[in-house]
Amino acid sequence: MKTAKAEKTKPEDKKAIKEKKKKYRAKVTGEQLACIRRKEAVRLLWHIFRIMILFGLCFVILYPLLFMISCAFRKQADMNDPTVMWIPRHLTFSVIKETADAMNLKTTLFNTIKLNIGCSLIQVVTTAVTGYGFARFKFKGKNLLFGIVILMILVPPQVILLPQYDQFAALGLINTAWTMYLPAMTANGLRAGLMILIFRQFFKGLPKELEDAAYIDGSGPMRTFVTIMVPNALSSFLTVFLFSVVWYWNDYYVCNSFFSTNQTLALMIKNISSVLKAELFNDASLQVSTRELVVWTQAACLISITPMLVMYACLQKYFTEGIERSGIVG
C-alpha cells in the first residue's frame, strides 16, 4: 500500500516542482535566467564528462579480461587469426583443456594453495602481534622502528632480494617452501609493512578500558591479546588475510627468484611456452608462432586468476566490510 501511494504522489511532486520553477523563472531577470542556464549546462557537461571517464576506466580495466577470455576459448584453427574477436567464432574448451593438462593443474594448484594459505596464515599472526605491540606498548626506539616498518611499504622487494637469496642459498633452502615461510614468520613477507600498519591503527582505535579490565582480572599481555583483542579485531584479521592471499597468489617475482622447478602457477605461466611445446609436440625447442603462444599464455592466465575471481565473488561482502571497519586512526 505504501509503495502504491508513493508511486501516485511521484507525478504530482514532479508537477509541483515544475510549477515552482516556472514561477521562479517568471520573477527572475534576464541576467539571472542566463546564469541559471549556464549553471545547468555546466552541470550537464560535468555529468557527461563523469560518464565518459567511468566508461573509459571500465574499458581499460575490463579490456585485458575480455581479451583473455576471447583468446582462451578460441579454436586451434583461429589461433593465427590476427583479427580482434571479442566473441570467438568457434567457441571451444580445447585450448583450456590442453593448457590445464600441460600445467598438471591438480598438482600445481594444490602446491600453490598450500604455499599461499600457509604463508598468509603465518603472516597474519606475526603482523597482528607486531601491530599490537606498536599500538599498546611503550619501549625505546618505538617510533624509529615504526618508521622503518612504514619504509618497508615504500621499498620494493627487489632491494632485499639478493641478500635474501644469498642467505637462503647458504642454508640450502632454495627450491623449498621455507624461502616463503621464513619471511612470513618474521613479519617480513609480501606487503608486511602495510599489514602491520592496518593492525596497529585498528588496535589503537579500540578502547583502552578493555585491556585495563583484563589486567585487573589478572590476565597478562598475551592472554589479553588472544582473549580480548583478537575477538574484537576479527574484521581486520579477515581483511589482512584476504589481502595476503591475493598478493601471494599474484606474486611472480619472488616465486621465480627462489623456485626453479614448476611448483606454482606463477612458474607454470612463466614457462608455459616450453611446457606446452614439450607436452603437445614432445619438443620444447620447437618454433611456434607468436600468436599461438599468446593464446596459450592467455588461457594459462585465465586458469590462474579464476580461483581469485571466485573467491572475491563469494567473499566480497566480508572484503568490503573489513576494509571499512579497518579504518586508519590517527
Image: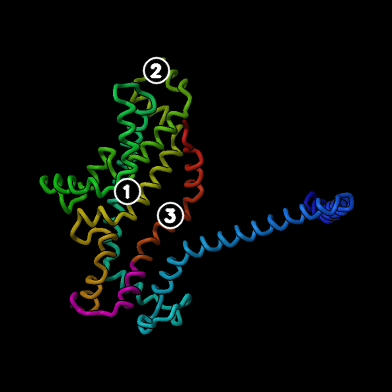
Q: Which mark is residue 290?
A: none
Report the magenta residues as a range.
282-300
* Three-letter amino acid code at the position of disc 1: Ile
Is residue 283 highlighted in magenta? yes
Q: Give the mark count.
A: 3
Residue sitting at x 24%, y 66%: 271
- Confirm or deny contact between disc 1 and disc 2 (CB under 8 A): no
Of the residues shown, which amino acid type is indicated by label 2? Tyr
On the image, numbered disc 3 is attached to which residue?
311
80 to 213, vertically: above or below: below
Q: Is residue 8 visible?
A: no
Secondary element under disc 1, as helix, strand or loop, is helix
At horizontal 26% and vertical 64% (from top left) the residue drawn is 270
Ranked by sequence position, the earlier of labels 1 and 2 is: 1
The secondary structure type at the circle numbered 3 is helix
Mark 3, Cα crowd under 10 Å, few <14 / some 14-19 / many 20+, is few
Residue 287 % position (x, y): 22, 79
Residue 290 within the magenta-colored segment of the rendering: yes
Rendering coords of residue 258 (x, y %) = 20, 53
* Label 2 environment density (alpha carbons within 10 Å; few <14, some 14–19, many ≥20): some
> Cα distance, mark 1 to mark 2?
34 Å
For the point 89% across and 53% down, the residue is: 26
- Image height of 262 relative to 147, above or below: below
Residue at image mark 1: 117
**Image point 22% across, 71% down: which residue?**
274
For the residues marked 1 and 3, what is the alpha-carbon distance in whole angstroms?
Answer: 13 Å
Which label is found at residue 215?
2
Q: Are marks 3 and 2 in contact (CB under 8 Å)?
A: no
Asked whether 89 or 36 is in front, the reply is: 36
Residue type at mark 3: give it.
Answer: Met
Residue 75 in view: yes
Counting from the top left corner in percent of width and height, residue 206 is at 47, 28
